Image (tube, rainbow, N blue to C red):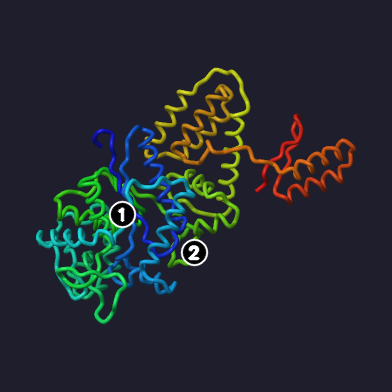
């Protein structure tokens, strides 16, 4: 971390379908990390890859390329599929207020560098060729798999045994896969070893090293990357460069649904658009993610999302109030800011930082003006768009109905007043009767 610069690599999406909200949870965690580094005064060089070739349906180097499956499914070319879902992914990031990486890099743009890298590994004597492709010999490394616990490693190895004929060790992985004979792949390239395409684990090492050097500061990804993908990135880096790829490895836990995994093969995925169609603000999902620490599982339910939406609406409302009210009290602004920084620097403790925010909102000792500044300051990390919140414009029609209801109430015509209240609710607004008169709010 020289000159307050941080080099950060985050494994990006495989663009064969929409990212599901479980995938997006990892990107939210990485965004919080990036914002916290920024909050601490670091400049972050953030590289994210787009895996547009080489990620097979099975991590055991078998199965089909996910992009080619997408192409068949949608009767488009592999290139069109990659392009379409890359754009969809970028749109999701925007909706979730996730800051774009400094550099986007596609696997298909770095094929030459990947071939050169495999040549280097070949020179180091850690590769071998079988009918299926060029493989990395994991037995050549003393401490292969140190990132994952031994138990996990054995489990995975057991599951992967005998998957590819000719593999020397169950944990060996493909660096370059040959195109199957008689099959014309849509994405394939010439190489010194034969026509084919790179392996997913090679892609990430090459793209990260190209843009950030080795070792760079922080490598992120989902927890599912630990036993194979990241373990194999480390193995290649140590063999090629004699050092670990990154100084720190940070992984986000799973989002579960009904306490189980969310995944395309489980046929239970929810995408961001599903949330929006149900009337949720995408930032309510961001809020929900902040309520749980990134290294803990988060179980998704519509009820939990609804609660997050309510909390976010409430936060917006309270933020708006800091604009209109003013009172002169003693201020303990600085104390809050320091606590916030301590919590975020303690392994990104977003749940406690949110609790602190609510404490500040309710703290009568704080000046309203300071409260506002504090909220906007915290939001540099939370990314919930607090500064953009405007008073909702209440349509004239609703205002008229509210006036009419007030008249009915004065005339003690409660039945009619209730009827109008229901009508207002049907139109998406609710009335709160206060001492100062009725308040109109948007009803969700
Ligand atoms: Zn990766």
Label ID, residue 226: none
Between 165 and 181, the one lying in front of the other is 181
Residue 323 seen by the camera = yes
Q: Along the polypeptide, which appears first: circle 1 or circle 2?
A: 1
3D distance between C-alphas at marks 1 and 2: 30 Å
x then y, percent, for residue 272: 50, 56
Ligand 1: quadrant of the figure: bottom left
Q: Residue at x 54, y 47 (%)?
A: 284
x then y, percent, for residue 435: 76, 30
Judge whether 2 appears above or below 293 on screen. above
Residue 228 seen by the camera = no
x then y, percent, for residue 243: 17, 48
Q: Which residue is drawn at 40% across and 59% down?
A: 86
Q: Residues within 10 Å of mark 1 (few under 14, many from 20)?
A: some
Horizontal relation, residue 11 to residue 415: left or right: left
Q: Quickly name the residue at label 2.
A: 268
**Mark in front: 1 vs 2:** 1
Q: How many labels does the image show?
A: 2
Horizontal relation, residue 407 to residue 321: left or right: right
Horizontal relation, residue 15 to residue 110: left or right: right
Res. 218 image quadrant: top left
List the single residue furthest toward the bottom.
182
Q: Does the residue labelled 2 lie within 8 Å of ligand 1?
A: no
Q: Quickly name the residue at label 1.
A: 105
């Amino acid at each position: 971390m020289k000159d307050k610069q941080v080099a950060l690599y985050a494994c990006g999406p495989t663009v064969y379908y929409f990212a599901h909200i479980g995938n997006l949870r990892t990107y939210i965690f990485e965004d919080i990390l990036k914002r916290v580094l920024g909050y601490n005064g670091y400049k972050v060089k953030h590289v994210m890859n787009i895996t547009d070739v080489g990620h097979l349906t099975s991590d055991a180097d078998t199965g089909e390329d996910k992009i080619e499956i997408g192409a068949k499914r949608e009767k488009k070319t592999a290139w069109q599929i990659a392009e379409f879902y890359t754009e969809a992914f970028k749109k999701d990031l925007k909706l979730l207020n996730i800051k774009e990486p400094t550099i986007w890099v596609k696997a298909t743009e770095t094929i030459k560098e990947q071939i050169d890298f495999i040549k280097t590994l070949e020179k180091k004597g850690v590769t071998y060729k079988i009918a299926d492709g060029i493989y990395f010999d994991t037995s050549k490394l003393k401490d292969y798999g140190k990132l994952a616990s031994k138990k996990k490693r054995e489990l995975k190895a057991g599951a992967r045994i005998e998957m590819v004929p000719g593999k020397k060790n169950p944990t060996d992985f493909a660096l370059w896969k040959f195109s199957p004979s008689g099959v014309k792949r849509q994405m394939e390239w010439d190489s010194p070893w034969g026509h084919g395409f790179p392996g997913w684990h090679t892609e990430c090492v090459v793209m990260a090293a190209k843009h950030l050097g080795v070792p760079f500061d922080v490598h992120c990804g989902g927890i599912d990357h630990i036993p194979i993908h990241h373990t194999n990135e480390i193995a290649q880096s140590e063999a090629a460069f004699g050092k670990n790829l990154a100084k720190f490895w940070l992984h986000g836990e799973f989002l579960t649904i009904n306490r189980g995994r969310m995944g395309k093969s489980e046929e239970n995925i929810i995408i961001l658009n599903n949330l929006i169609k149900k009337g949720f603000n995408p930032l309510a999902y961001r809020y929900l993610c902040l309520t749980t620490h990134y290294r803990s599982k988060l179980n998704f339910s519509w009820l939990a999302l609804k609660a997050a939406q309510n909390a976010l609406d409430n936060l917006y409302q309270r933020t708006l109030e800091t604009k209109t009210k003013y009172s002169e009290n003693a201020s303990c602004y600085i104390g809050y800011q320091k606590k916030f920084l301590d919590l975020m620097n303690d392994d990104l403790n977003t749940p406690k930082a949110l609790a602190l925010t609510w404490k500040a909102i309710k703290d009568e000792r704080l000046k309203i003006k300071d409260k506002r500044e504090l909220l906007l300051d915290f939001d540099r990390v939370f990314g919930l768009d607090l500064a953009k919140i405007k008073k909702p414009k209440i349509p004239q029609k609703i205002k008229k109905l509210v006036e009419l209801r007030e008249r009915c109430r004065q005339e003690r015509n409660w039945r009619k007043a209730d009827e109008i209240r229901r009508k207002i609710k049907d139109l998406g607004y609710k009335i709160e009767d206060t001492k100062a008169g009725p308040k109109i709010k948007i009803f969700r």
